[in-house]
Every structure is written in structure tokens, then in C-alpha cells.
Image (cartoon, grey):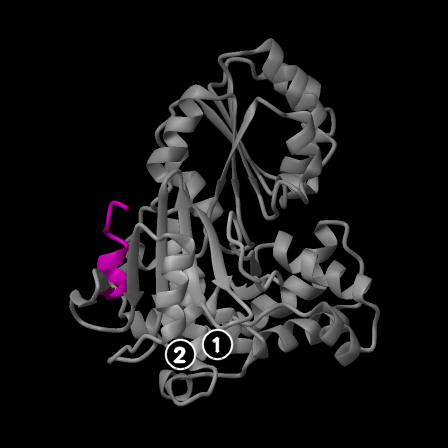
């Protein structure tokens, strides 16, 4: 049974009103499956997978190929980063054929696919597909299983823990030894693998380039380059601090999070939920899980964390207009708040405040702060 992704409707809508729609996201995250579900809505379309030599060859003279197929309503081009010079051709073609639509899929951020963001400016809309969100799996997977295996389809939909772990190990190896080269990134895989494993132990902490530089024995410029690669290929998230109109001494270093807890646990060599639950990194892993689900669900909000040198702290802040949502993440079944939380919500003038914890039901904490399980929080209309 196929699982309809949260983005399905909004992608259909953007195809209707803009000429080029892009689905970007990590390799193996489900972009192709989603695209095939979407293209079923169109009677007259062409699907090209540029990992197939036969399809890549069709675009050797892309201008001629597209002009020969002007009767098509939708072109779907998968793994477009394998044909970077195609973007210039697309620009002139869409300008001359206003009714033809393109759905393109890429395994990198618009910054890494720089040609698309520059060449197709004003003609393209990006949708970022994350690994499965918990709301997409809620009727078929437990939260514990989802937490352990992460959201990559071939990891979470594999019932056997051992096979799931083996798939993730292979995913990491393929990413390092093959996928990076498709983006024109040629660096020693062992170096970035070493950094990636170090970051797994630092997940949910402040990002300290100097400390990482000393640990790896390379300069900070190299460390930043490696972290940028992991960021632009959707492996990690860099969460910036919130300090708008706040006069206190703010920690201005960003925090680093793994986007997928399954990948995180593989790098930490955690194979079962029992191993995870009893691991000292459990709390940091839980924080990653919650942050990714919330940011992906409420993607029309800006997201930050907050910390002062005096100890005021919030794990996540969502900001949109006059709305400032304060979120504290706890892995305990009986969450407790520190004095720093209460100071922080006053500092930022939070309009609403929540605790997200592995509880079974919603209940009030005190002073209008509510405790929510993840499932129920994701259903809110903030």
C-alpha cells in the first residue's frame, strides 16, 4: 500500500500555477515514488530518469528533444543534477511554451543546484521532501519504531530491525562513495565519514568549528566545507539562534541536528530500541526527532533556538508575524521545567508555550504552558 505524502496536494497546486516545480530532498527519501503518484494525475506526460543512460541520451540535444514533444502537458525529469547544463535550455523553453509544465527532482538544496536557482528565477517553486513525517506513518508505525529507524522509506518500512540497520549502513556508504561525486564533490570519503560520526556524538549541541578542527587535525575552512556538504545534501540541519530585539547576552553559535534519527543511530551503532533507550544519547536523539517533525509540519514559520549566557534556554522557537511559539522538548514521561525556561519565554515574549514529551495525552503544566505528545501537537493549527 502506497503512502500519500503530506506534500502531494501542494505540489499538484504548484504545477497548476507555475511552470517549473521542483521536489528536492535526500537520496532514497521517496521523491521518485511521490513523483510517480503525481504524474498519474496527468494523461499526457513524459517521465525521464537521468540515472538511466537511455533517458540521459535523449537529452543530449535537449532543445531538439523538447521541441519535438511540444504536445506534452508535463515533463518529469528525475535526478536533474546529473544534467546541470539543462537548466539554461529549460529557461528558454518555458519562456516560449507557457502552457507546458515541468516537474524536476533533485537530491540537493537549491544552493547546491545553483544553476536552477539562478537560471530559472521566477519560474520555479521548490518543495523539500523530508524522510517520512510521523503523521504520514501514524496508522502503521509506532513512535518507538519510527524513532529507532528514522523516516527513510526503505528503513522504516522494513519490519526487521537487522535489515533496516543494514540498509542504513549501505545508504551511508553509497552516499559517501558515490552520491557526493554526482554533485561534483570529490573529497576523501573517509574524511567526511569521520566528521559525520563525530557530529553524531555532538547532535543537538552548539556547533564549534574550532573544536572540530582540532579533533580532526584540519583547518576550520575544511570543517565548514564538509558541514556545508552534509547540510546541502539534507543530512544535517543547522538551527540558528534567536536574538531579534533582545538585549541580553545571547549565545550566537548555531546548533546542529541530524535530519534523520535512523542515520544518526547507525553512525552511533545503535541497532535496537532497547539499546537506544538505555543510551546516553537518547535525549539528544529524541530532540532531533521532535525538531524535524515540527519544522517540517510548520514550514511556514521561521525556526530558531534560544540560549543566553545566563542560562535562559528554549529548544525551539517558531516565528511568524506576531506569533512567537516557544517549545521545550523533554524525553521524560514526567517533564520538569527549569528556571531558564520561564526566563526565556519572558525574554522572547512568547505568545504560546508548549512542552513536547513522550506522554499519552495533553495536559496543562502551569501558567498556560501545555504538555503535548508529538502526535497531537502536529495536529494543531498554530
Residue 138 quadrant: bottom left
Judge from the rendering whether residue 189 lies leftward or rightward of residue 278; answer left or right: right
**Is residue 167 positioned above or below 353 on the image?**
below
Between 377 and 181, the one lying in front of the other is: 377
Q: CA distance from mark 1 to mark 2?
A: 6 Å
Which residue carries the number 2 mark? Answer: 161
Residues at circles 1 and 2 in contact by the CB criterion of under 8 Å: yes
Residue 2 x/y as whole percent: 31, 51
- Residue shown at the point (65%, 32%) measured from the top left: 116
**Residue under the image location 58 percent in, 79 percent down:** 201
The answer to whether 95 is drawn above or below residue 141 in the figure is above
Tell which of 68 and 121 is nearer to you.
Answer: 121
Q: Residue at x 79, y 66 (%)?
A: 220
Q: Residue furthest top?
A: 96
Mark 2: few, some, or many residues within 10 Å (few <14, many ≥20)?
A: some
Which residue is under mark 1? 165
For the point 69% across and 56% down, the residue is: 228
User: What range is drawn magenta here?
Assistant: 371-382
Image quadrant assignment for residue 372: bottom left
Residue 322 picture location, percent across and down? 36, 40
Residue 379: tell me if it is visible. Answer: yes
Amino acid at each position: 500500500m502506497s503512502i500519500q505524502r503530506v506534500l502531494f496536494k501542494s505540489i499538484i497546486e504548484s504545477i497548476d500555477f507555475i511552470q517549473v516545480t521542483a521536489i528536492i530532498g535526500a537520496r532514497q527519501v521517496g521523491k521518485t515514488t511521490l513523483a510517480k503518484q503525481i504524474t498519474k494525475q496527468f494523461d499526457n506526460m513524459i517521465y525521464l530518469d537521468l540515472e538511466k543512460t537511455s533517458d540521459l541520451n535523449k537529452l543530449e540535444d535537449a532543445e531538439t528533444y523538447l521541441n519535438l514533444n511540444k504536445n506534452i502537458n508535463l515533463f518529469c525529469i528525475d535526478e536533474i543534477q546529473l544534467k546541470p547544463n539543462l537548466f539554461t535550455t529549460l529557461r528558454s523553453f518555458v519562456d516560449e511554451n507557457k502552457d507546458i509544465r515541468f516537474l524536476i527532482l533533485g537530491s540537493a538544496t537549491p544552493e547546491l543546484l545553483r544553476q536552477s536557482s539562478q537560471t530559472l528565477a521566477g519560474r520555479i517553486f521548490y518543495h523539500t521532501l523530508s524522510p517520512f513525517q510521523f503523521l504520514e506513518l501514524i496508522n502503521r508505525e509506532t513512535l518507538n519504531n519510527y524513532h529507532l529507524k528514522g523516516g527513510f522509506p526503505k528503513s522504516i518500512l522494513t519490519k526487521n530491525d537487522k535489515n533496516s540497520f543494514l540498509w542504513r549502513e549501505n545508504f551511508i556508504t553509497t552516499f559517501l562513495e558515490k552520491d557526493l561525486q554526482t554533485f561534483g564533490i570529490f573529497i576523501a570519503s573517509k574524511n567526511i565519514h569521520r566528521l559525520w560520526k563525530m557530529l553524531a556524538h555532538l547532535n543537538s549541541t552548539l556547533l564549534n568549528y574550532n573544536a572540530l578542527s582540532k579533533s580532526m587535525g584540519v583547518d576550520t575552512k575544511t570543517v565548514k566545507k564538509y558541514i556545508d556538504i552534509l547540510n546541502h545534501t539534507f543530512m544535517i540541519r543547522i538551527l540558528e539562534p534567536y536574538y531579534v530585539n533582545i538585549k541580553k547576552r545571547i549565545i550566537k553559535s548555531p546548533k546542529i541536528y541530524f535530519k534523520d534519527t535512523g542515520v544518526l543511530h547507525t553512525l552511533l551503532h545503535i541497532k535496537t530500541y532497547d539499546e537506544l533507550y538505555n543510551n546516553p544519547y537518547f535525549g539528544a536523539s529524541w530532540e532531533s526527532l521532535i525538531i524535524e517533525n515540527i519544522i517540517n509540519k510548520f514550514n511556514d514559520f521561521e525556526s530558531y533556538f534560544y540560549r543566553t549566557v545566563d542560562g535562559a534556554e528554549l529548544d525551539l522557537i517558531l516565528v511568524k508575524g506576531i506569533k512567537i511559539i516557544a517549545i521545550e522538548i523533554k524525553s521524560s514521561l514526567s517533564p520538569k521545567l527549569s528556571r531558564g525556561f520561564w526566563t526565556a519565554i519572558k525574554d522572547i515574549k512568547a505568545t504560546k508555550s508548549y512542552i513536547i514529551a513522550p506522554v499519552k495525552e495533553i495536559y496543562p503544566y502551569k501558567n498556560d504552558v501545555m504538555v503535548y505528545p508529538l502526535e497531537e501537537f502536529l495536529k494543531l493549527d498554530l
